[in-house]
Image: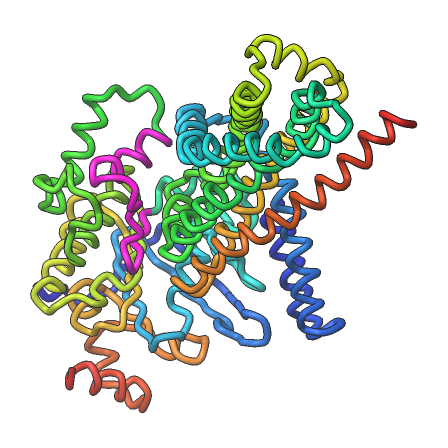
């Protein structure tokens, strides 16, 4: 299952480019000069302690938060400068898997998946919508849950349905916010396998926010360690593993003890 | 644009440190956010896409949720007001004025007010809690990143639904109240339904009906807007959801009474000059 640790750097422009990014909440600085490029077909895992600003970073990529300073470019477009329509058009190419899945609890699984599709793609008949929903559920291995309500699903199933909901719009970029948090090791392994499957089937580039080293090791081409508002180290798992950085060592040791 | 403006205002307040005192700063920040929320509603309400199915669902939801309560309270208000007013009129031998008095009271004040208070409790708290729960569980963010405008889908439809449904409920409540009054009058004075209604509406002017509709629409808009604002800005988990529902009811009722005062003062200015 371990992913080949090689850097994907190609001649093309990066699908996500972040430069000089700063963000504070009140007087609390969260991000203090972030630079990162995500290339087509690449998976990058962002490691960091709770509260280090990992989720804030991906929320700025998708335009949920605005940066105080710096530039976030997605598929060549400056996210902060886009108007609502342009931002929505860009968001159609980005899949966002939330930490707690964020399934609409008043809708069943079918409606959860059909909702973004019917709202964004006009003139689809019932059969086409059903087929697309079934295809997305098939991809995450939960076709039999189509009529269930989110409250009847387990944590792992909810994560999978959340990923299926993003896949229905066939995104080019996937952003995973803590995909394995709160899951047992077996279910975590299933989610890791699913992340890799999504990349191979849908040819996505992914940013995976996590503090789970197993997840980072098995899904990412590169790993970026976020500490004190900056990336203290970016590289392959092996490069990071032999680091002299005390913080990084502590992080690695803690994960292995766990 | 409004999102950016709101962001800039919040950043400016945060970056300046404490301007007056922390509480006053927060209040001013809330006022500016609430104002931008209302402006955004008017901007989004008249631009495509229009979520008509969701609007119809919400109208039914608002109407059906409150129908039983409105029926019971409307009926009780009609009966009790008639019962309480009778002794005063009996002293002057003017019980024949009872239908007109009750009708004036219901059309000018009680109908819209009772409906608004019931709906603030029933519908307002429901909207505040629903949107609050969606906010804290990131369902609103999930809509946003799926290229669906959650403001348009959740807020615009709910505010429009309360603005449409509450005047209808107020009319219904008024008729139920008058029917309760009729039953009481019929029992005591053996009046017929037709003569009761003819008598009741004889003193109702166009201005009364206009004020009735203006109040109902204003209250409906206020209930929807305040509840959505509180829910949409809920923070701090389940505690925040409870607070959003609670504040939605309290603030709505407070604003409804202020609006009642302003509208009555304005209408009386036209009525009496």
Question: What colouring does the structure picture have?
Answer: rainbow
Quadrant where the image shows the N terminus of chain A = bottom left
Q: Residue at x 44, y 53 (%)?
A: B132
Q: Position of residue A154 (x, y in %)?
A: 15, 56
Above or below B224: residue A40: below
Q: Residue at x 30, y 72 (%)?
A: A47
In this orientation, which residue lies closer to the viewer: A3 or B172? Answer: B172
Q: Residue at x 67, y 13 (%)?
A: B199
In this orientation, which residue lies closer to the viewer: A258 or B176? Answer: B176
Residue pushed farthest right?
A: B273
Magenta stretch bounds: A95-119
Q: Position of residue B23 (x, y in %)?
A: 67, 70
The answer to whether any part of residue B175 appears in the image is no
Left or right: residue B225 compared with residue A257: right
Above or below A205: residue A143: above
In this orientation, which residue lies closer to the viewer: A123 or A238? Answer: A123
């Amino acid at each position: 299952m371990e992913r080949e640790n090689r850097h994907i750097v190609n001649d093309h422009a990066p699908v996500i480019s972040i430069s000089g990014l700063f963000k504070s909440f009140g007087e609390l600085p969260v991000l203090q000069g972030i630079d990162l490029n995500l290339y087509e077909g690449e998976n990058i895992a962002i490691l960091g302690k709770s509260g280090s600003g990992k989720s804030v970073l991906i929320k700025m990529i998708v335009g949920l938060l605005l940066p105080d300073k710096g530039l976030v470019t997605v598929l060549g477009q400056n996210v902060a400068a886009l108007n609502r329509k342009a931002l929505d058009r860009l968001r159609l190419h980005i899949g966002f898997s939330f930490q707690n899945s964020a399934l609409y609890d008043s809708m069943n699984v079918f409606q959860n998946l059909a909702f973004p599709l019917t709202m964004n793609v006009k003139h689809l008949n019932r059969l086409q919508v059903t087929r697309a929903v079934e295809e997305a559920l098939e991809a995450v291995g939960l076709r039999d849950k189509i009529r269930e309500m989110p409250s009847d699903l387990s944590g792992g199933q909810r994560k999978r349905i959340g990923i299926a909901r993003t896949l229905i719009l066939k995104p080019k970029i996937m952003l995973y916010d803590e995909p394995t948090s709160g899951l047992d090791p077996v279910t975590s392994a299933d989610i890791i396998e699913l992340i890799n499957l999504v990349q191979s089937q849908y040819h996505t580039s992914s940013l995976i926010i996590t503090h789970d080293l197993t997840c980072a090791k098995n899904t990412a081409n590169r790993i970026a360690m976020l500490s004190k508002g900056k990336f203290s180290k970016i590289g392959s798992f092996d490069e990071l593993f032999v680091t002299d950085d005390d913080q990084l060592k502590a992080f690695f040791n803690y994960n292995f003890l766990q | 644009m409004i999102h950016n403006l709101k962001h800039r205002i919040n950043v400016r307040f945060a970056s300046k440190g404490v301007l007056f005192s922390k509480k006053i700063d927060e209040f001013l920040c809330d006022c500016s956010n609430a104002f931008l929320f209302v402006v955004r509603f008017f901007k989004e309400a008249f631009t495509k896409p229009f979520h008509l199915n969701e609007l119809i669902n919400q109208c039914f939801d608002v109407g059906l949720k409150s129908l039983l309560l409105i029926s019971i309270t409307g009926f009780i208000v009609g009966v009790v007001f008639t019962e309480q007013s009778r002794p005063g009129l009996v002293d002057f031998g003017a019980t024949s004025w009872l239908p007109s008095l009750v009708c004036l009271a219901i059309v000018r004040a009680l109908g819209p007010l009772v409906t608004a208070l019931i709906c603030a409790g029933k519908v307002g708290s429901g909207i505040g809690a629903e949107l609050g729960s969606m906010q804290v569980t990131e369902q609103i963010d999930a809509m946003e990143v799926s290229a669906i405008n959650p403001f348009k889908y959740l807020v615009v439809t709910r505010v429009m639904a309360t603005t449409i449904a509450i005047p209808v409920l107020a009319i219904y409540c008024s008729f139920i109240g008058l029917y309760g009054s009729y039953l009481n009058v019929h029992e005591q004075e053996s009046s017929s339904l037709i003569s009761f209604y003819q008598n009741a509406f004889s003193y109702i002017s166009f201005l009364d009906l206009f004020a009735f509709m203006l109040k109902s629409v204003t209250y409906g808009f206020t209930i929807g807007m305040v509840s959505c604002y509180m829910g949409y800005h809920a923070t701090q988990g389940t505690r925040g959801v409870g607070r959003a529902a609670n504040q939605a009811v309290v603030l709505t009722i407070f604003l409804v009474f202020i609006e009642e005062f302003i509208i009555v003062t304005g209408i009386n200015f036209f009525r009496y000059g």
